[in-house]
Amino acid sequence: MAARKRRAPVPGITNDPINPQDNDKPQKQLSILLNENEKLIRDSFGDSIDLSIRRLRVGELAEYELLIVHLQGLVDDWLVSNSIIQKATELSRKINSSGEIFQILRDNLLAVSELETVAGVDELIAKISEGSCGILVNGVADGLVCSVPGGERRSIEDPISEPVVRGPREGFTESVQVNISLLRRRIKDPNLWFEKRVVGTISKTEVVVAYISGIVNEKTVQEVRERLKRIDIDFIQESGQIEELIEDSPLSIFPSIFRTERADGVAQALADGRVAILTDGTPFVLVVPSDLSMFLTSTEDSYERFYIASFFRLLRILSFFISLTLPSFYVAILTFHHEMLPTELLFSIAAQREGIPFPAIVEAIMMELVFEVLREAGLRLPRMIGPAVSIVGGLVLGEAAIRAGLVSPAMVMVVALTAVASFATPAFNIAIAARLLRFPLILLAASLGMFGIMVGLFTIFVKLTAQRSFGVPYLAPFAPLVPEQWKDSVVRAPLWTLNRRTNLVANRKNLVRQGPGNEPLPPDSKNRQSGES
Amino acid sequence: MSMRAERITGAQLMSLLYITRTVPITIVFPTLQAVEMTQDLWIVSLIGAVLTVLILLPLLFLGLRLPGQTIVQYSQSILGNIPGKVLGLILVIYWLKIAADVMYAIGDAYTIAVMPETPIWVFIILIAFMGAYAARHGLEVVGRISLSIMAVIVLTGLLVIVMPFETAKLGNLLPIMENGIQPLIKPVTVSLSFYAQFVIIGMIIPHLNQIRDSVRFSGYALIVTGLLIILFSVTLTIVFGITAKDLSLPAYSLTRMIRVARFVERIEVIVLIAYTLGAAVKLALMLWASSLGLAQLFGTSNYPVLVYPLGIVSVIAAHLFHDNHMELMSRLIRSAPWVVLVIAALLFILVAGALLRHSSKSPGGV
């Protein structure tokens, strides 16, 4: 297992390692008789209506019988009729035996890229379920399966959950084959390797592990393989379910596996020495190992000028803290530490709160809950009504609540600022983690002031410091402190200074990313340098 | 919990030592109460820092001479089973005492300065939980958070030292050593008794990923700690002059003097928060060391199960042995000479034992 190294051409993956659990069963062989085989297949699929079985008579006197089996909607109908049925009829005019027809079909007939011979019934059925077309010849105990991928698929679109101003517009789709080709188009190195596993006893979901051999840390790949192997479940729909079954800290609020639907983001992660886990049926790809700073960066940071990118990164860190702590600080100051505010501001807030019947904590929790409801409502509604809800909810409710004397304008501002700050976090799941932790922090602030907030933050800090993602500390460049890596996490230094990959992630024997002389210089200074040396 | 080897870096050792010495001592600052004249304070701090070399050197010598062993382990291998265990037990009790002091000092600071109506045990129990929670995750996590928190403490510490300069009177530093060297002895022992807490390095050295770093980084720790405490003493003296001795929480009072642009004012709560974070780290270190020490006395390595019980023990100790702020201060000052004496005696015995043991073996050995 450890030494298994496979290379797969695109499209599609050949030489799939069949999962070990499949190897244990005794294989039932195909019969020589076509009728028996047909019955076997029909029985396996329960004569399902999407099963298409075509009996074909070929040969000069139409004396040989072929059986063409596929599932409707999974194959390309045009290819089946043109490359298989028509070709088979044409080529089998001058033959003398069923064995010969099988040979001709196998060797020079079919105009498809992938063709395999199968002998077992289960194997044949598995291939048909995956969307291959099976061909059986009367009198031959072997079958042919050819890959004729087709069917309806979503086209490649702009990833709507992670928009950028500048950068590629390609997002992953639900088809793992398309996703693999998207990655292969971005990384043309033959060291980009894909490994396939099938997860889910019913869904038989293809899960593909992608990495760049030589750059990736072999231990990480091995760990991914082992954890995927451990999964024993019936049904997998989305990579989130895989994530829950392989992550390091299953009870942590903070996600320890990064997910993205941007092809350029995954390609960059692979080039950094990370491992991608693609799941068939979802555009969301998992990336491991992932640390907290990954969740706070956007792919766009690498494309914009480094001043802009650095500013954005600092801004995102700031807004992450605001979204986590601002309401609790406000509650703590109002409840316990009035003296921290400048006197005029204190008077102004006190005047606003004059007629408000609730203490600050009730106000804060109420408004935060209203905001969470609004956010959820805006998200679930049809796209046409969504903005209407946010306008009615946000503007009208907020304004009316202030007029009715239920909440103070300052509190509405704090909650709104928190909401906006939480939208500035690029990864949705980490923003939600911050939003969830806001409530206990507000409670702590209301009961113990700054001390309570500190207890909460310290506990979160310890928990996150102890958290790991596939062997990499979650708070990597901060705790443990690796100042050298701050240049591509806290800020983004100019590209020509990022000479090495992160040694926590990538293969330590291969860390050099680029030569030292990449800094662009004006032509005359280049001449001068070369003249000197 | 798996018994993976815990490894920390030299910089993390430095931050642990720094936090051990400065927190929460600079909040309550017993040395200030011990000096006769405030203007001698910075000289006392200087002498204390310099004399600390005498504590660090034997510890480093022992740590490098017996690599891979904690002070609890090598005291047994040097002195033999029973005397070594007695010595180890003394150290474990010493660390628990420090833990109890830390809890009480922080709770005390909060009840005096910020939330007088909240009972002190609320703070004691919460801070004990924070420390034990971190200690439970092992030295690696404690080391990592300590480095970040040290950055926060140093930043706020510099803020406190630099910002109140407009109210400072340099004349307050004079006259120096009016009554000669005699009155300095007592405050120097107090200062030294807190530096004696560096004995914790005996537990940390075997966990360094580069054992040679211990010399360099404990040196840095001493320099940084000494400098900041001396600067802090100077600022305290020039801002408050002779009245400094009346302050119960000097660092807190210094922060109250800060006022920038009519906006940044009364930030003392933030400084207090920074020190409390440091106190939690120190507590975590003490609980980690005492649990590991106790586990090693019993010959097991499963120390994490001991962390919470020992945390509860130190909470009870904090409750039983302290009455109020004045009592805490006077006890810290009264016990200072004994602490210094006991630690010095322990170190002397260990070093002598290690040297004798070495000479009794073949010269090429070890």
Image: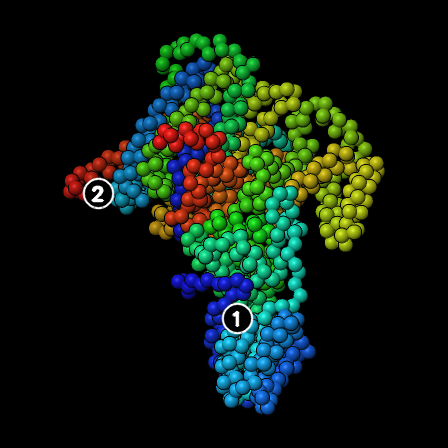
Callout 2: SS: loop
Quarter of image, res A223: bottom left
Quarter of image, res A438: top right
Q: Chain of mark 2?
A: B
**Residue indicated by mark 1:** A114
Against A512, residue A346 (above or below) is above
Looking at the image, which is closer to me, A292 or B98? A292
Q: Position of residue A340 (x, y in %)?
A: 65, 27
- Mark 1 vs mark 2, CA separation in Å: 68 Å
Image point 34% across, 24% down: which residue? B51
Image point 59% across, 64% down: which residue? A236
Q: Position of residue B21 (x, y in %)?
A: 43, 30
Q: Amino acid at mark 2?
A: Val
Q: Answer with left or right where residue A151 lies relative to residue B29.
A: right
Q: Answer with left or right where residue B81 lies relative to residue B272.
A: left
Image point 63% across, 81% down: which residue? A53
Looking at the image, which is closer to me, B48 or A242? A242
Q: Amino acid at mark 1?
A: Glu
Mark 2 nearby-residue class (10 Å; few <14, some 14–19, many ≥20)? few
Callout 1: SS: loop
**Residue indicated by mark 2:** B366
- Whether discs 1 and 2 lie on one chain: the answer is no
Mark 1 nearby-residue class (10 Å; few <14, some 14–19, many ≥20)? some
Quarter of image, res B187: top left
Q: From where the camera sits, is residue A318 visible?
A: no
Q: From where the camera sits, is residue A154 visible?
A: yes
Q: Position of residue B114 (x, y in %)?
A: 61, 29
